Image (spheres, helix red, strand yellow):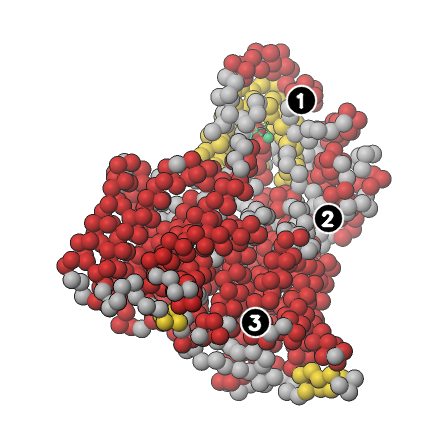
């Protein structure tokens, strides 16, 4: 069962006085897919990190369904059903792919039968990694490692899935695999997804709603079809502010 | 000739096992938190004082002294993590790594000063568990205390290996060591597993010091020498690598004893430094060090 | 503070040394001040290395001790005058520091503190064991710089050396080297990306600060006149770190303030005995690190924003 995510006035500062996110609002309806786009350095990753609890939140609220989660630590948020697949490499390189998947179900590790079922299921998701389950994750290619991270992020049956540029650096075949899985997740209507993407067209095609971030704040938002219609204007707007598009 | 050689080799290995036990917690904590704990030597020092207290003052049997040392070391390590380190690495300040070094270094000086004030500077010794010299192969003599200490040290390291590679705690430690971000996103609670690592680290250091106490002296500044040894071991072995620590500990023990026997007896504690420099010239990251650190 | 004030500070120290030498201080106070110069040179140069270049070395007292024993060797065995050692030892210790840096700075990050700590430990053991050279805990005797024991001479010399230190510090911090050092401290990756020759800058900082430590050691030997291996202890290193940290690491006058604070505390609690002094000082330093992370200067300047905000170089 998934829940809606509501973000109100979210602020994040990594170091004491430099605020990267300066009050971001967002609403992701239950079982929908919300895409987040914006120029480099806009704070897209920072937003997902703030929601996942791996970046220091200095103000604002995050509601997952009826629960306030902004005061929970990262581990507790995983327990509350949040799963985050970061932009940076996050595989455990010295462990096998299967061990990586097993850690994906860390918060319910006592439930052995469930865990084995989920590992088997998620190990089967992507053809590109299926033959390599026994290999050390660190020995796989960068793209394969990303697929391992995505599969690992699904083991815990999240209610809220945060994907940060899941297809960056992937081969076209793998990109198709990832989007097939995203479409399947959407169809299953069991998870709310926030998706950060650079491939704006791909993202708009699957998204229900789109948010545009710039300089650590909301720029604009709207239904995917509507944003797609005025995309050229939005991107031109980024270009004209080139160099100042960064949150800092 | 061979007699002397074999005897030195055995003696070195026995000594090295204790060095490994002393250093392994330092490596474990570094792997998980990227924190070099300069107060590690004082965990050992206070552990050995706890043993002296229990055995000499309370008159309890020697083995209870070992337990007391492990408990005291663990307690102080835990307190250090909660009171001194956690406020720093949970803060949003820059250069946390450097600040943890300064903070633990000053803590170590404070603990030495406080210990000097409370216990005085007298050198103390503990009775051993097995105060007897054994003859092996008729011509090689080893003290029973050394054998007891070595067996205990190896047993503890084996226990640690079991924890690291066979239990959930160990899986969490390995995950944190290999990829802190990955560990956070799968829901591993850093604080909880850092606490456990500090408990283990302090217990091992305290126990190692108590096992060494019948062979060496117990005094407030003993932690500095212990820390120098532990640093040499982790640098040779590669910071964060438990296998490397075990190997480097044994190596340091053997090299020290060999050099003491064959070169000059006075400089035992300085040979390790020469060995460390030699290793660094060929492998700056240590023998088992990797760019992606692994437990 | 303006650039001009920075350049006036050295003059101030020289003048203070001269003035104090004339008014005939009580010997206790004069000794306290003269030895404070030793600590100022050490804490100040350590601040340059750690606070400005971000390289946390624990070899500093070891390097000073090398400077002191080198002085003894040159004077006793080589028959040189103490004045010559004040010039030779800084250069010699800079080379020693450079050699240590070549090994310890090859891998980035935590290796340096560990290796330098091990160096200090091993060197201490060596000094204690090599009693045929160091005369064990009895110590080595050195003659004074001029016959008789005239504290006013050392007050003048101390003023000059402190002034010299601030000249070197100004030259480093305001010059290109200081900029590069701070770039490396703040973000080694970015500095690397900007094409800074990281290793060379670190070695340069290491050698210059080692030279100052060598000077401090030579001054110490020529003043105190008795050298024992106990000069090199981690407790002394803790002292130096405490001074830099209490005053404010990475601040130009942090160590100066730290030396003043700690030496005053020492002076006033000296009746309790050495054990208490050490507990008090390390305790204070620990509290500062935990609760006032940037030291006294930052704390005070936050109380009065305008005037002192620019102290941070
Ligand atoms: N750990 C950190 N510490 C300090 N600043 C950071 C950190 N991570 C990111 N930043 C800064 O925050 C700003 C936003 O970064 P963020 O990664 O959120 O951008 P983004 O929108 O995801 O960009 P991209 O499209 O390139 O991934 C940048 O200016 C970056 O320098
Ligand atoms: Mg990003």
Residue C251 is situated, as x and y percent measured from the top left of the image, at 36, 45
Quarter of the figure with the C terminus of chain B: bottom right
Circle on res. A199? 1
Answer left or right for C121 relative to C242.
Answer: right
Coordinates of residue C192 in the picture (x, y in percent): 55, 36
Looking at the rendered image, the disc whose residue lies closer to the viewer, 1 or 2, is 2
Whichever of callouts 1 and 2 sits on the residue coming sooner in the sequence is 2
Instruction: Specify the subunit that label 2 lies on.
Output: A
* Crowd class of label 2 (few under 14; some 14 to 19; many from 20; radius 10 Å): many
- Rendered image quadrant of residue B111: bottom left
B110 horizontally vs A25: left or right: left
Quarter of the rendering occupied by the N terminus of chain B: bottom right
Q: Is residue A60 above or below residue C126?
A: above
3 or 1: mark nearer the eye? 3
Q: Residue at x 66, y 79 (%)?
A: B146
Element under label 2? loop
In contact (CB < 8 Å): disc 3 and disc 2: no
Is residue C4 shown above or below B229?
A: above
- Tag 3: Cα neighbours inside 10 Å, few (<14), some, or many (≥20)? some
Q: Is residue B207 visible?
A: no
Which of the four quarters of the rendered structure image does ligand 2 lie in?
top right
Q: Chain of mark 3?
A: B
Look at the numbered disc 2 and say if its residue's Cβ is closer than 8 Å to ligand 1.
no
Q: Residue furthest front?
A: C79
Q: Which residue is mark 2?
A: A94
Label 3, on which residue?
B267
Marks 3, 2 in one chain: no
Report the residue at 28% width, 40% height from top: C6
Where A126 falls versus A209 (above or below)? below
Residue at disc 1, secondary structure: loop
């Amino acid at each position: 069962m998934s829940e809606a995510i509501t973000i109100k006035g979210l602020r994040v500062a990594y170091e004491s006085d430099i605020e990267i996110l300066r009050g971001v609002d967002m609403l992701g309806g239950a079982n929908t897919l919300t895409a987040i786009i914006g120029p480099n350095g806009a704070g897209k990753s920072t937003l997902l990190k703030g929601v996942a609890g791996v970046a220091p939140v200095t103000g604002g609220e995050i509601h997952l369904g009826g629960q306030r989660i902004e005061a929970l630590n990262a581990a507790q948020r995983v327990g509350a059903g949040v799963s985050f697949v970061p932009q940076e490499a996050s595989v455990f390189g010295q462990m096998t792919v299967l061990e990586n998947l097993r850690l994906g179900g860390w918060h319910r590790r006592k439930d052995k039968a469930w865990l084995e079922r989920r590992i088997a299921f998620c190990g089967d998701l992507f053809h590109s990694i299926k033959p390599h389950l026994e290999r050390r994750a660190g020995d796989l290619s960068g793209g394969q490692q990303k697929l391992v991270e995505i599969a690992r992020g699904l083991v815990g049956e999240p209610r809220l899935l945060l994907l940060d540029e899941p297809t960056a650096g992937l081969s076209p075949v793998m990109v198709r695999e990832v989007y097939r899985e995203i479409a399947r997740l959407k169809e299953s209507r069991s998870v709310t997804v926030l998706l950060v993407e650079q491939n704006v067209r791909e993202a708009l095609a699957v998204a229900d709603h789109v948010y545009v971030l710039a300089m650590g704040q909301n720029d604009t938002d709207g239904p995917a079809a509507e944003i797609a219609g005025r995309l050229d204007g939005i991107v031109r707007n980024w270009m004209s502010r080139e160099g100042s598009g960064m949150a800092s | 000739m061979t007699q002397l050689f074999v005897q030195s080799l055995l003696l070195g290995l026995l000594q090295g096992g204790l060095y490994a036990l002393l250093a392994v917690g330092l490596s474990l904590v570094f792997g998980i938190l990227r924190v070099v704990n300069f107060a590690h030597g004082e965990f050992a020092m206070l552990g050995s004082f706890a043993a002296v207290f229990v055995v000499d003052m309370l008159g309890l049997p020697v083995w209870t002294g070992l337990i007391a040392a492990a408990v005291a070391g663990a307690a102080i390590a835990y307190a250090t993590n909660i009171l001194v380190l956690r406020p720093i690495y949970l803060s949003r300040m820059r250069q946390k790594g450097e600040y943890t070094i300064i903070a633990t270094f000053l803590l170590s000086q404070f603990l030495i000063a406080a210990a000097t004030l409370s216990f005085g500077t007298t050198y103390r010794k503990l009775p051993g568990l097995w105060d007897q010299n054994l003859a092996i192969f008729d011509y090689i003599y080893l003290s029973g205390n050394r054998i007891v200490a070595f067996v205990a040290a190896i047993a503890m390291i084996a226990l640690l290996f079991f924890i690291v590679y066979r239990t959930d705690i160990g899986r969490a430690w390995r995950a944190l060591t290999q990829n802190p971000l990955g560990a956070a996103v799968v829901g591993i609670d850093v604080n909880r597993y850092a606490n456990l690592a500090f408990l283990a680290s302090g217990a091992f250091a305290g126990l190692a010091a108590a096992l060494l106490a019948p062979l060496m002296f117990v005094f407030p500044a003993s932690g500095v020498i212990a820390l120098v040894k532990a640093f040499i071991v982790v640098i040779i072995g590669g910071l964060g690598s438990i296998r490397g620590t075990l190997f480097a500990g044994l190596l340091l023990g053997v090299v020290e004893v060999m050099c003491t026997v064959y070169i000059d007896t006075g400089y035992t504690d300085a040979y390790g430094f020469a060995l460390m420099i030699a290793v660094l010239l060929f492998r700056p990251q240590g023998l088992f060090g990797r760019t992606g650190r692994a437990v | 503070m303006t650039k001009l004030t920075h350049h006036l500070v050295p003059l101030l120290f020289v003048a203070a040394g001269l003035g104090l030498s004339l008014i005939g201080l009580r010997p206790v106070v004069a000794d306290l001040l003269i030895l404070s110069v030793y600590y100022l040179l050490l804490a100040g140069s350590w601040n340059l290395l750690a606070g400005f270049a971000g390289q946390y070395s624990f070899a500093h007292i070891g390097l000073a001790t090398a400077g002191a024993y080198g002085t003894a060797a040159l004077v006793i065995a080589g028959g040189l005058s103490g004045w010559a050692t004040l010039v030779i030892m800084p250069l010699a210790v800079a080379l020693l520091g450079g050699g240590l840096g070549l090994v310890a700075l090859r891998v980035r990050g935590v290796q340096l503190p560990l290796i330098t700590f091990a160096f200090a430990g091993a060197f201490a053991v060596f000094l204690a064991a090599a009693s045929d050279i160091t005369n064990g805990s009895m110590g080595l005797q050195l003659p004074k710089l001029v016959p008789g024991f005239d504290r006013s001479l050392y007050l003048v010399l101390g003023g000059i050396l402190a002034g010299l230190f601030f000249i070197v510090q100004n030259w480093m911090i305001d010059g290109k080297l200081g900029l590069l050092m701070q770039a490396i401290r703040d973000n080694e990756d970015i500095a690397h990306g900007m094409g800074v020759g990281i290793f060379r800058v670190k070695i340069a900082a290491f050698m210059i600060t080692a030279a100052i430590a060598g000077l401090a050691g030579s001054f110490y030997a020529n003043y105190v006149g008795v050298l024992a291996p106990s000069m090199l202890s981690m407790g002394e290193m803790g002292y130096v770190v405490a001074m830099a940290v209490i005053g404010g690491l990475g601040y130009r006058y942090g160590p100066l303030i730290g030396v003043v604070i700690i030496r005053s505390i020492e002076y006033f609690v000296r009746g309790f005995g050495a054990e208490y002094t050490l507990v008090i000082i390390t305790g204070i330093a620990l509290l500062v690190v935990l609760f006032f992370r940037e030291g006294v200067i930052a704390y005070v300047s936050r109380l009065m924003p305008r005037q002192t905000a620019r102290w941070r170089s």
